[in-house]
Image (cartoon, rainbow, N blue to C red):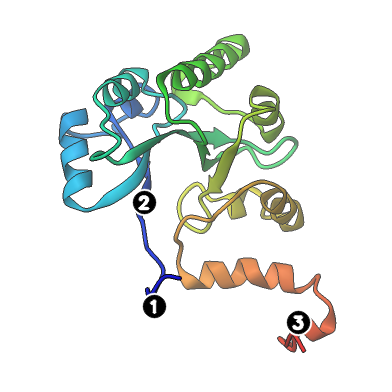
């Protein structure tokens, strides 16, 4: 039995952009991107798990370079990820942003996911600076892939704004997917929780939920 009194904590950064975000968003990334520099910074800050999540595109060159030089005994683990612009079918025209973090750590799956996305955008004949998908399209693209769905919630491009007239649907959608909200101001967290509270039994709404 372990003598440790506390749990182990892991530093994670699942929202890192590269210079490829400039390909899909005007003036989104400034400076020169380097996989080597990124790896050094992550190690300096004891980050053990991360993802590169560009806007509506997967930087295949950066993933290939990182995986080619990856040392499992020394380097942070890289999960394949992307940040998508998502619109609500039949809803508000403004897109919200959500990270998709996939349970893959290899070049083959990074390429497969990259190719699926690019094929879908080509099929839709969407200008590269106006790429959007719906939840239905995302589910159809990745029906058998395991991923976390992490929407913006309370800051810019928020899922709350997109579902302002139908917050219940947003809550159900997030509950049914593997999801975790990005860190947001407390008042927005409270607003979201209040929406759930309306559907709870009276005892739970009153926080009278002792397990005995």
Distance (Cα) linking label 1 and label 2: 22 Å
Q: Residue at x 36, y 23 (%)?
A: 59
Q: Is residue 58 left or right of residue 70?
A: right
Tell which residue pokes out farthest to the front in this image. Answer: 1
Question: Dot 3 corresponds to which residue?
Answer: 205
Alpha carbon of mark 1 to alpha carbon of mark 3: how far? 34 Å
Task: Give the Cα distance between marks 3 and 2.
Answer: 33 Å
Residue 111 vs 186, above or below: the answer is above
Q: Is residue 206 left or right of residue 183?
A: right
In front: mark 3 or mark 2?
Answer: 2
Question: Closer to the camera, 209 or 140?
Answer: 209
Disc number for residue 5? 1
Q: Are marks 3 and 2 in contact (CB under 8 Å)?
A: no
Residue 36 drawn at (x, y percent):
17, 30
Query: Mark 2 — residue?
Result: 12
Q: Quadrant of residue 24?
A: top left
Q: Residue at x 16, y 40 (%)?
A: 40
Between 157 and 52, the residue placed more toward the observer is: 52
Question: Which residue is nearer to you in this view: 43 or 113?
Answer: 43
């Amino acid at each position: 039995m372990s003598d440790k009194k506390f749990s182990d904590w892991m530093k994670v950064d699942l929202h890192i952009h590269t210079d490829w975000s400039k390909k899909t968003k005007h003036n989104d990334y400034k400076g020169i991107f380097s996989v080597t520099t990124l790896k050094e910074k992550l190690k300096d800050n004891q980050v053990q798990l991360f993802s590169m999540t560009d806007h509506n595109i997967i930087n295949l060159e950066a993933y290939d370079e990182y995986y080619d030089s990856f040392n499992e005994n020394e380097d942070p683990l890289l999960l394949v990820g992307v940040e998508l612009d998502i619109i609500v079918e039949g809803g508000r025209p403004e897109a919200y942003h959500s990270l998709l973090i996939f349970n893959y750590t290899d070049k083959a799956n990074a390429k497969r996911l990259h190719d699926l996305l690019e094929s879908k955008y080509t099929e839709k004949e969407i200008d590269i600076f106006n790429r959007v998908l719906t939840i239905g399209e995302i589910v159809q693209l990745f029906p058998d892939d395991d991923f976390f769905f992490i929407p913006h919630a309370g800051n810019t491009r928020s899922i709350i704004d997109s579902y302002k007239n139908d917050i219940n649907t947003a809550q159900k959608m997030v509950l049914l997917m593997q999801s975790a909200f990005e860190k947001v101001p407390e008042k927005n967290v409270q607003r979201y929780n209040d929406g759930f509270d309306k559907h709870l039994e009276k005892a739970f709404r009153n926080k009278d939920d002792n397990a005995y």
